[in-house]
Image (spheres, helix red, strand yellow):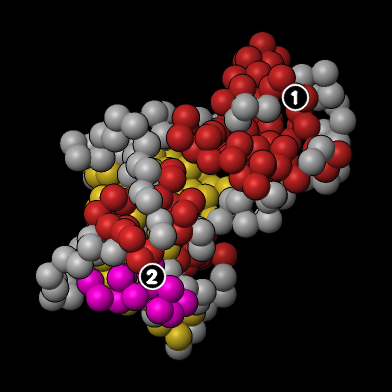
Amino acid sequence: MSNLTMSSPTPISKSSGITPTPPEDSNSQVAAPAFDVKNLSIWYGEKRAIKDISIQIPARTVSAIIGPSGCGKSTFLRCLNRMHELVPRTRIEGQILFNGENLYRPGSDPAMARRRIGMVFQKSNPFPTMSIEENVLVGLRLNGVRDRHVLNERLEKSLRMAALWDEVKDDLKKPGMSISGGQQQRLCIARAVAVEPEVLLMDEPCSALDPIATARVEELIRELRTRYTIVIVTHNMQQASRVSDRTAFFYVGELIEFGETAQIFSSPRERKTEDYITGRFG
């Protein structure tokens, strides 16, 4: 949690124009943490992108991260499955516990972390030389799965989970790039869930989609929250209010506030959170 001094709550739901609509039957009150982040700082070379963040992200919930561009949202997201290590001259301090285990313990395998903690990127990225089927199954094959029955079963299951099976079941041999942008993003979600991760990280998954495709992905997020811990970075505050159980507000590399989405959007405890939500900056 943020170390900032808490100010008196200030109701802002009318001025913000955002009516929070957290998913039904939210279980974020009782869920154990999937991630327990303690005093996390991240540097790119000499630049400190994340500053001493501590936060607990509950399991089987949707946590949204909001904040202006350049505030460290995507950097934080990528450190949760060690993707940030692919950037040269990256350095990390602090601790990230994933289901109680140190994600950065000496000798741990980053590839295994990325298998258990899947990621969906801002721009849909089906492998251009692969079919729809091959895109979904590539992770399984890289992990040594060869049984055709298992592959076929996982293919259908993953596409159904991504609400895509009925749309592509007769076109599985067609290129992954041949379907629409919204379908491509759901294909990438199917690819991520095919290896049966425990967590899905989503970095602005709807930013390049039209409203109809965005609605389909948001519906999918609400459905997947019963199976996965989901952490989503979004610039769209209305989207955060629609799909998330909890919301974190980041500003210049710091965690300003983290709490129930309804509380964040109606009665934020921090003045900076209120100013951002009401459009005074950002």
Q: Position of residue 262 (x, y in %)?
A: 29, 50
State the residue in front, 209 or 1.
209
Residue 255's image quarter? bottom left
State the residue in front, 272 or 231.
272
Which residue is painted at 49% across and 84% down in the image? 45
Which residue is painted at 24% across and 54% down in the image? 263
For residue 278, which numbered disc appears in the image? 2
Query: Residue type at mark 1?
Result: Glu
**Going by the picture, which residue comes out furthest to the bottom?**
46
State the residue in front, 276 or 76.
276
Query: Residue type at mark 2?
Result: Thr
CA–CA distance between discs 2 and 1? 40 Å
Q: Is residue 28 magenta?
A: no
Q: Secondary structure at mark 1?
A: helix
**Going by the picture, which residue comes out furthest to the top?**
149
The image quadrant where one finds the N terminus is: bottom left
**Residue 252 vertical placement versus 266 (above, below):** below
Report whether 53 appears left or right of 251: left
**Residue 66 vertical placement versus 281 (above, below):** above
Residue 227's image quarter? top left
Q: Position of residue 202 (x, y in %)?
A: 52, 50
Q: Residues within 10 Å of mark 1 (few under 14, many from 20)?
A: few
Q: Give the magenta-colored segment's residue range.
A: 269-282
Which residue is painted at 68% across and 32% down in the image? 136
Q: Position of residue 277 (x, y in %)?
A: 38, 67
Q: Secondary structure at mark 2?
A: loop
For residue 167, which numbered disc appears in the image? 1
State the residue in front, 123 or 141.
123
Report whether 42 appears left or right of 118: left
**Residue 73 vertical placement versus 239 (above, below):** below
